[in-house]
Amino acid sequence: MKFSYNWLKSLYPKIQSPEIAAESLTFHSFEVESVAKRGNDYVIDVSILPNRMADAAGHYGITKELAVIDGGELKLVSPKFKESSKKAYDFLSVRLDKNSGASRYSARVLESVKIGVSPLWLQERLVSCGLRPINVVVDITNYVMLETGQPLHAFDYERLHGAKDRKQIVVRKAKNGETMDTLGDDSKKLHLATDDIVITDAKNVIGLGGIKGGKGSEIHASTTRIVLEAATFDPVSIRRTSRRLGLRTDASIRFEHNLSPELTTRALNLAADLLCRLAGATVLQGTVDAYPKREIPKAILFSVKQASSLVGTTIPEAAARGILIRLGCQVHPHTRTSNAQRAKTEISRFGVGVKKKSAGVYLVTPPAERRDLLIEEDLIEEVIRIWGYDKIEPQLPAIRGGVPRKSDESIFVDTLKRRLSGMGFCETQLSAFVGESELMPYRISPTSLYQLENPTSPEKAYLANIPAINFVRSIAENLRNFDEVKVFEIATAYIKTDKGPVEQKRLLLGVAEQGKDGREEFYLLKGAADALLESFGIAEHWYDDAVADRHSVWAHPFRVAEIKVGDETVGTIGELATALHEAQKSRARIVIAEFSLARLLEVAEAEREFRPIAKFPA
């Protein structure tokens, strides 16, 4: 996101040079991509973190960061303009429908507006930030957005449908079949969905909430009376609509990151002040404000001792408190209630407590725009990043050193992987999730699996109890690009039981080659299985092919065998069932071996011990 250095300096005169300011931001706040000279200005390109877009997507937010880092003070200049005797409520009403997707909609009415060209200084600042000047009204709305981070929009009052003397704006969800023509030279007709947020007058959709204004109510050269609006919309709805329609605007980018409803009135007043000074506007009295449920930031308990403990070094209490105050937080000492000693007071008989200050503990209320500050750890992060990570002295861990020991299973798995790779197999790591459509060919009921509460897609709605489902699909997909596939996977089967989920580790081997009927691959995989088992000292294993009535769900009923050690089954080897082969549209017969990792580990012989050759053999 681009920021004008001259603009930043006008808000914070004590700002350092562009290079030093960029370095401070990089070390304490956000990474600066570049600093480029443009005429008599510098453009600083800052990569704003997603959780900070709500407060730092404007020049004021960046100057506040710099002031906090420098230890300086940033004074907020209040807009100064005179309101007329006419009341905005007499000319405009605003209504938010239930489930409209808007938490606040604020508007001001201005008249006697003179449409013209913006002054050069304003145009230069817009161009520095990548925006094209249009006219004084539109430019001012964009200017205020770039300064505060709050998007604005202006409607031509006379072009709104409704009563001549009093217009009504309604914010609601779109209806089936509704369309809207966007404003601008690249105007196009949008077909709206029922989860899109729209702004309407008495007749038409005049804006796609948080994304784009509609054609017909835009500012023209003949416009004299305008409705200036600032709102807050549901970020999820904005993101979905923006992606579906392929409309990504400066406004939608900001609304997607959960702006605070408390920003609207200040942005409106700044824009009204500029319109009075630059366009000769007169501001009607009052703000038409639909704000059903005001958001009040919650206080967070902050302990300097806890902060020092988490960070690993002592943070001065005065420094921590000062940083939080400069960030705009309300900081008050925390008081705790303790029972007084009965010998000293009779009040304690009735359970009345005496309030005492807790040393180094504060109740901190973040500013409304800092929607990322929710818990104590968030405040600790703010304190340490401003105080300086470089002040944390490196220390060796105060623990007794030792060589960590891997579990027997980890050692066994590592050895498995090395030996299979040496045999020419490639390892795969696949998702454990499957969809209902993938279960049907295997005749697995979805009720026998664990279902996700909020899956990212229908294809990832269940935890697989048969890892071979995704393994087979992976082999079939690879056969579209390769003539031969040899793969293995260490996978987990999630078994649903009355006592809760049971996880079972499985080893899967798969072989397929185009142009072959599967018989050759079967013996190839059998040879690989023999070599693998013998490498762990499991020489006395055998194959039981009399398992047609209890074969694995993925195997061909007459081309399958159980792999046994003594009377214990450790795995299954076989060709993929014909129905599954057809369902996967595989170009070759797929042969699979599936082992229980736990059983393999049980029957594997202990690691062979070697003794050095005697120095003096007999």
Image (cartoon, rainbow, N blue to C red):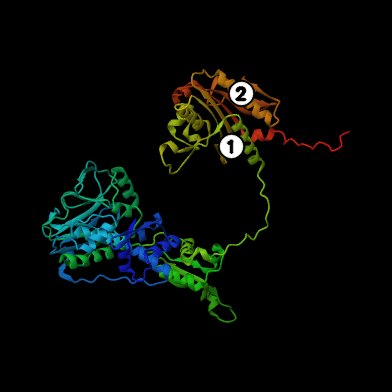
Work out whether residue 203 or residue 529 is closer to the camera in this orientation and state it: 529
Label 1 crowd bin: few (<14), some (14–19), many (20+), radius 10 Å? some
Drawn side of residue 435 relative to residue 130, left or right? right
Q: Position of residue 527 (x, y in %)?
A: 62, 23
Q: Is residue 442 above or below residue 302?
A: above
Look at label 1 and name its amino acid.
Answer: Gln
Q: Percent position (x, y) of residue 414? A: 62, 38
- What is the CA distance from the residue labelled 1 to the residue labelled 2? 23 Å
Q: Considering the image in quadrants, where does the N terminus appear?
A: bottom left
Single out the residue that lies furthest toward the bottom. 344
Q: Which residue is mark 1?
A: 504
Going by the image, does 101 lie left or right of 359?
left
Query: Which residue in the structure is indicated by mark 2?
Result: 526
Q: In the picture provided, is 522 more to the left or to the right than 318?
A: right
Residue 564's spot in the image, x, y percent?
Answer: 66, 26
In what quadrant of the picture does the C terminus appear? top right
- Res 19 visible: yes
Q: Between residues 225 and 113, which one lies in front from this camera angle? A: 113
- Pointer 1 or 2: first along the chain: 1
- Looking at the image, is 479 positioned above or below residue 77? above
* Residue 359 in the image, given as x and y percentages of width and height: 53, 73
Residue 141 got which mark?
Answer: none
Within 10 Å of the Cα at label 2, are there few (<14), some (14-19), or many (20+) other Cα atoms? some
Asked if residue 367 is positioned above or below residue 606 in the image, the reply reads: below
**Which amino acid type corresponds to the residue marked 2 in the rendered image?**
Lys
